[in-house]
Amino acid sequence: MAVRQAMLAFVSVLAIAAGASAQDAKSVVDVARQPKSAWPGPTEPVKAEGSRNIFVITCASQGIGCVRAANGVVEAGGVLGWNVRVIDGRGDPAAWNAGILSAVTAKADGIVLAAVPPMLVGDALAQAKAAGISVVSVFNPKPEEADSVFAYVRPDHVAQGALAADWVEVDSGGTAKIVLVEDPIFPELVQRGAGFRESIASCASCEIVEAVESTLATMAQRLPGAVAAALSRHPDANYVIAPFDSNGFFANEGVRQAGRIGSVRLGSYEGDPQTVAAIRAGEYAMTVADPAEWMGWQAADELVRAFAGAAPANVTVIDRLIDKDNAPDTEGWLGDIDYKAEFRTLWGK
């Protein structure tokens, strides 16, 4: 009898803990859905003077988020009187390196790396540094030790992964069976996956039933079939979480191939236009959105600071959880603040 009572007490403690975890997750998700009304950017004005030649190297044209960030740099450059050239990185480290070396040859003033991992272009960045070129990274996490990059414009990727896990727990009622798509190449995507894994572990009845590896260079050709096969192996799977929105669309094609549209919920990150539109249409479940164009403007702000001899702002970028209940009518999530006016004021423009 004593053993049975002890077991019942243990089960009761587990149930209370699970209930507390679910309530915590719901509170986090509810807050994450709300508009971000406070200015989170830099507050120290910096004078923008003179024309500059800027190179932006994108991860690839298939990566809509890095293209959007590049578009933001171009737009901000127009305000600042800069000449901005965008190079498609094609998802290829050789192209990333070549783009940086082109900037060195052209005697550029600044380089923006749009989701190009600095550690994969270290030699080229060393040449840029030797040439006196200021470099700003967008999307990549800020390393613990200082490097040749002047500033990092990025959200908290680990927290984004944890938020996606909280949403899965709440949305599923704590019973999710998840196919997790992971990209091992880009550090920010690795961090999102790690944050997701750590957070979902607190959901006692949730389970990652399979992890599917995917890369930017191969996702169009391989990811749909890989997701379809994973879903066939796990007929109880009811969620697919992808590391970014463009990847999520190929993952969704895999859901379609498996005949599981309607029974499998898809989530990802970045808040790109096609994803937000699909959420509004009920064809996609959730994205943890970054204001990518805003990030391009913020990268331009960091270059202004570099040219002025000021310290980098290194401000963490805001994000917002978007689902059908709060999906905006805009082309993607652009942020809930007039960030362009804020940056113009900071620059005296």
Image: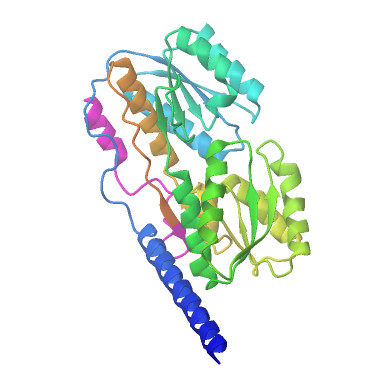
Q: Which residue lies furthest to the bottom in this view?
A: 1
How far across and how far down the image is residue 208, in percent? Answer: 64, 60
36 on left or right of 99: left
How far across and how far down the image is residue 241, in percent? Answer: 60, 55
Magenta stretch contains residue 311: no
Provide the residue span drawn in magenta: 322-349
Q: Is residue 309 above or below residue 75?
A: above
Q: Is residue 329 visible?
A: no
Q: In the rendered image, which quarter is residue 326 located in?
A: bottom left
The residue lying toward the viewer, choosing from 14 and 160, is 14
Which color scheme is applied?
rainbow
The residue lying toward the viewer, choosing from 145 and 166, is 145
How far across and how far down the image is residue 27, in percent? Answer: 37, 66
The residue lying toward the viewer, choosing from 317 and 325, is 317
Q: Is residue 33 above or below residue 306?
A: below
| Residue found at x 64% / y 31% | 91
305 on left or right of 55: left
220 on left or right of 69: right
Q: Is residue 55 above or below residue 116?
A: above
Q: Give the main secondary structure of the magenta stretch.
A: loop
